[in-house]
Image (tube, rainbow, N blue to C red):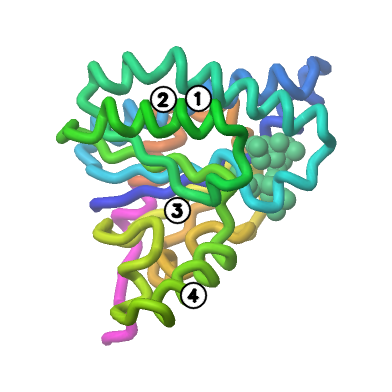
Amino acid sequence: MKHVAIIMDGNGRWAEAKRVPRLEGHRRGAEATRKATRSCIEHKIPYLTIYAFSAENWQRPEEEVRDLMGLLRHYLKNEIKELHENNIRLRVIGDRSKFDKDLNLQIEQAEAKTIANTGLNLQIALSYGGRQELEMAARKMAENGGKLEDYLYTAGMPDPDLLIRTGGELRISNFLLWQMAYTELYFTETLWPDFDAAVFDKAIEEFTRRVRRFGRR
Ligand code: IPE
Ligand code: IPE
Ligand code: MG
């Protein structure tokens, strides 16, 4: 197993159930990402891609978008040292043109700091949409030639072997459309802030029991 992708969903419902502000759900969700990186390192899985903010999430109420951008700034500022110490290489995938200049600078600095790290490859999908990515790649390929996958944000990375979606919804929500052609899908009712190593281990365990045929027999 080389690559796990995660749709981190259910922060809002977690907050609702606890009768706390939505922002608190997102805050706890951000903390849960640490458990996901730790689990990947433990299982020696070299690539982890997490869906933190979709291209469509810009349509949420202004206040929630502002809160999420604030959390992102906070995460980049406070988490980068620990990521670096753990030899994690961070990459952000998605449409950066939508972010404020200072946030883009922060992203670039975080990527630059960890670029030579040789441990876990952590991709955070931000302002990411699979269709938008494919349109961008198709445009670049028409201009410059070559293969479509060379122009994807994930160029050079293995496709995800396993997708985990928390929060109980049974859909892909525009995540890694090209890359997940043969990905095994695992859905759990657990809300993202409650995600932990046990949830991860259960997904891995189920994955090992799946038979991947890739069209062959
Ligand atoms: C996932 O949690 C985080 C983002 C999409 C930013 P949600 O905010 O979608 O939580 P639910 O689905 O409303 O519970
Ligand atoms: C998917 O969650 C996107 C992220 C987790 C970042 P959403 O909550 O946006 O998905 P839908 O709207 O339920 O499909
Ligand atoms: Mg949701």
- 191 vs 184, left or right, is right
Mark 2 vs mark 1, CA separation in Å: 5 Å
In the rendered view, would you say 57 is above or below 30?
A: below
Mark 3 vs mark 2, CA separation in Å: 16 Å
**Which residue is labeled 4 in the image?**
139
SS for dot 3 = strand
Q: Are marks 4 and 3 in contact (CB under 8 Å)?
A: no
**Ligand 3: quadrant of the figure:** top right
Mark 3 vs mark 1, CA separation in Å: 17 Å
Q: Are marks 2 and 1 in contact (CB under 8 Å)?
A: yes
- Which residue appears at 37% of the width and 20% of the height? 80
Q: Amino acid at mark 1?
A: Ala
The part of the chain drawn in magenta is 205-217
SS for dot 4 = helix
Closest to the observer, 116 or 205: 116
How many circles with numbers are drawn on the protein? Answer: 4
Instruction: Check residue 32 in the rendering and tell me which mark sits there, or answer none.
Output: 1
